[in-house]
Amino acid sequence: MSQTSTTDHRLGFKSLDEETAVDSLPVTGQLPGWLSGALVRVTPARLEVGGRRLDHWFDGIAMLNRFGIADGRVSYRSRFLDSVAYRDSQEGEWRHGGFATDPCRSLFKRVQSMFSPDPTDNPNVNMARIGERYIAMTETPMPVAFDPETLATAGHLEYADKLKAHVTTAHPHHDTERNELVNYHAYFSRVSKYVLYGLPAESSTRRVIAELPVKEPSYMHSFGMSERYLILAEYPLRVNPLKLAFSGKPFIQNYTWRPSEPAVFQVIDRATGRLRGSYETDAFFCFHHVNAYERDGGRELVIDLVAYDDPAIIDALYLGPEEPRGPIPATELRRYVIDLESGAVSSETLASDLELPRIDYGRRNTKPYRYLYASRSADAWFDQLVKIDVSDGSETVWSAPGCHPGEPIFVREPGTDDEDAGVVLSVVLDAAAGKSSLVVLDARSFEELARAEAPHHIPFGFHGQFLRG
Ligand SMILES: [Fe+2]
């Protein structure tokens, strides 16, 4: 581990081995009286295993962080998820592979792990609530359940069905009418397939919505959902599953970028499971869909996402001794519009240089919307939060000296109608202080209302959710 004392963003890539519980953090400013609940995030907190720096940021060992908010006070708790990957790391071992970190093991074991249930279970990307169950997730289909108050691990989520899968996303959607979590997974075989499914709140049996055969699956970190459709955006970053089994390379290095091939939107009818159509456009890459909705009487499908020209971002996030090796490529908030009758695909750029996008998901997902919140790297690693008005591209920016904010999470003020009535929560590293804080912004003005300082730095993470109290 690096012994350098860091007073800039690099502190966010320094491991945190400490598990903490604090009843009341020091708070500056004024928290809204209506704000009650907990912000729970998963963070790749341990970036060295057995004295060796992990190869890639996406492989850090998962820790849960919880900021509890009630009566104007903020508590804080952190705890590692007790996954197999975590237990291995306690022994200094990296046995199960991951996204891009090589486990250095025999070919035989690799083949075994690809086609038998032995992938990593390190759930460091996101969390979700399904009914009364809370799960932490990564891109292998082994979510880990936990207690949202104590953060104690409750074991792997067990499915009652026999569906087999190799990769999935940590960005499920919520079907509020059916009260189910919607996701897709890919099953690798001689005849590989994408399977879109719903997991009901009260059941452990997944409901298959659709199956799509695919010769060479694309790497897809998230997907879109409109009122009528599920949308898989297949980027031409594809894998030959049979070669994957025998390659001896870490997972993502088996995918090949083919910029001369198109990106393909696979649009699936949610009610019937039928493929509405496959729509091609020029190659691009993306981690995060933002929103999708139909317009013009259902003739057009609008898909907003954060687009990269190519997958160089994956290479940029391999870890050096103190931070990812970079450089971080530019992004566009891009709007694709598919004319479902003619098959034509057009696109326009709504904004630039943002990542970790969030909207008022509960009310605006699958529908026209106006506001998006995101993190931006302007002069350094994630040094701004931005609010984008997608109706005209105008922006409001929040920043503070030496502060590096993570994903901004919108929380609606109960009983209000305006789309931006509420707050935006973000865990912000104050590099000079050497500590991270929960920062609360007024979502309308984008001004800081309050911050609650944790007792130490929290390594940069990906995603989290606000659980209402
Ligand atoms: Fe993500």
Image (cartoon, rainbow, N blue to C red):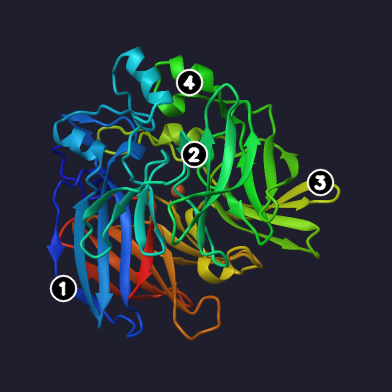
Side (left or right) of 121 relative to 139? left
Q: Which mark is residue 244?
A: 4
For image coordinates 67% across by 54% down, the residue present is 229
For image coordinates 15% across by 44% down, the residue present is 5
> Pointer 1 and pointer 4: residues touching (CB < 8 Å)?
no
Q: Which residue is mark 3?
A: 344
* SS for dot 4: helix
At label 3, which amino acid type do we have?
Answer: Ala
For image coordinates 60% across by 52% down, the residue present is 224
Eye-nearest disc, 3 or 2: 2
Eye-nearest disc, 1 or 4: 4
> Pointer 4 and pointer 3: residues touching (CB < 8 Å)?
no
Q: Quadrant of the N terminus?
A: top left
Q: Which residue is mark 1?
A: 24
**Can residue 458 be seen?**
no
* SS for dot 3: loop
Q: Which mark is residue 163?
A: 2
Q: CA distance from mark 2 to mark 1?
A: 44 Å
